[in-house]
Image (cartoon, rainbow, N blue to C red):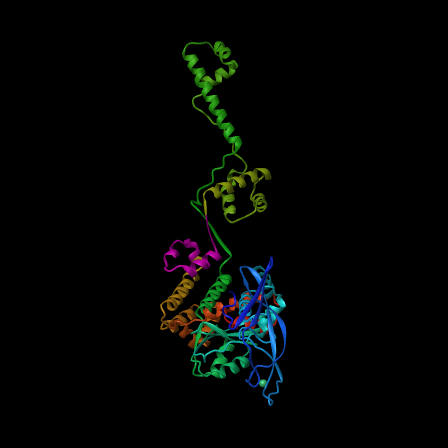
Amino acid sequence: MPFSSFTNIECLRVIQEDQSYMYLVKSKHSSCICPSCHTLSHRIHSQYVRSLQDVPAYGKTTYIKIQTRKFFCDDCSCPQAIFTERFTWLGTYQRKTKRLQEMLKSIALSTSCKVASRLSKHLGIVTSHHTLLRLLHKLKLPSYEPPVHIGIDDFAFKKRCRYGTIIINQETRRPIAILNGRDKETVVKWLEQHPTIQTVTRDGSFTYAKAISQALPHAYQITDRWHILKGLFTAIRETLQQSFPSIWRKTEYKNPTTEPLIIRKTDVQRHQYAEQVWQRALEVKEWKEKGKSIAWISRQMHISRNTVYKDLRRKKKEPISRVRLLDPFLNQLRQWNLSGWTTSRMEAELKKIGYTGCRSTLNEAVSRIRHEYRASATTHSLSRASLLWKIWSEKNRNWLDSLPSACLKEFPLIPQLFEVTRKFRNIVSKRSNQGIPGWIETCKMYSFPALDTFITYIEKDLQGVMAACVDPLSNGLSEGHIHRVKMLKRMMYGRASDELLKKRVLIPLL
Ligand SMILES: [Zn+2]
């Protein structure tokens, strides 16, 4: 029986259809209590049928038709002459049972009302998104215990337009209030109504810091650790942006004093020809030693007799070499190439110092010089992004040894930035704020502009930062709820009112 939780109800008939059940029911009571004067009445005035919807049964929509009676109130002094009988499981003027409304409330709070109405239809509940929206608007904001430890953060109702403030109870881990604004006056007004607060976690906002100091001077303020670390990260990144190229490259030559060996295609051909001639001469000499005549050798080897005579006179292999016009200037070209000169500039200078050759010869020589240098060169490169990541994430100094020495020599700020980062991260991770004044002095000594800005911020909010380094509380909970607010805003498609957003944020989903 689906109405076992409904007291004093008698089921008269059940009509089963394809998609629904219809229950015809009536009350077992013969009397009813007047809602105004609480007098028991037996006199029936009239009766009518109320049509209701209940929670679905076996995946089908459940409708109830209940015979409802009207009674006369017997108390003459009662302003209510006639009243309708009431049921504990049904609100006045309601078309849905209380348990169905609770179910719809949970579904509507879980997602947007349009999606909720589609989901409800799938579950066997007939409703519209307007009904669900009205249901949510009727909900009352939950009450809360006087908070002791709270978190405070801002969020956007509409980005770059209207902002609000969310207050989190750090003990219950629930949001307890949403304020329309993030200005000092709004926050002060709310804080003054809650004098029980002892600890407030917040981000780096000075507006909140001032508001807390004004409204609750005794409260202990804790700046969020993540925001402090983010501030340091930004300072390190900006310092690198100001001082380090996006990609640093340095080419080192293994032996820059060696004169490049220029071998041209024609040189190779000449060498091959000389070898060929020498082999032929050896053969000619061999035949001659065997007693063959010049004419015989000439016929046998298909060469002229003059060539035979020449070959017999050869004493050694003599490569045919030629002194080129460019040869005296090769050293000079190498120097200019190292200095990054263009070929046109080299040509102009060469002509001044006596080069009479053509441009194509020079082009070929320069091309070969460059090719040989590239082959003997080692290029080191380091990107700013990878350097930033190493400075931020490495735990000890060993990684500095793997950097090219030229890079460390050119940028002495790298080990300095690493030391600054490592020391501060140690302070935060070891939960000890003793080292902060010393760390600030070290940073001031290096005087990087972006880091100086961060130091100024730390000094302004020194109490909050010192507390953040030792206290286990942080503003992470508020940040998590801000994330939830953003998700809810997206589900609502930005068209619903701020009040509805507040209800969605503050009312817990049961
Ligand atoms: Zn009455």
The image quarter containing residue 282 is top left
In which quadrant of this rendering is ligand 1 seen? bottom right
* Residue 144 versus residue 375 in the image, above or below: below
The answer to which of 16 and 303 lies nearer the viewer is: 16
- Residue 477: image location, x then y, percent: 46, 70
Task: Note whether residue 160 is visible.
Answer: no
Which secondary structure is most common in the magenta stretch? helix
The answer to which of 505 and 181 lies nearer the viewer is: 505
**Residue bounds of the magenta highlight:** 379-408
The image quarter containing residue 107 is bottom right
Q: Residue at horizontal 51%, vertical 28%?
A: 269
Viewed as shown, does residue 81 lie left or right of 432? right
* 341 within the magenta span: no
Task: Note whether residue 312 is visible.
Answer: yes
* Residue 294 versus residue 136 in the image, above or below: above
The answer to which of 463 and 452 lies nearer the viewer is: 463
* 401 within the magenta span: yes
* Residue 258 versus residue 226 in the image, above or below: above
- Residue 103: image location, x then y, percent: 53, 67
- Residue 461: image location, x then y, percent: 45, 76
- Residue 315: image location, x then y, percent: 43, 21
The answer to which of 18 and 274 lies nearer the viewer is: 18
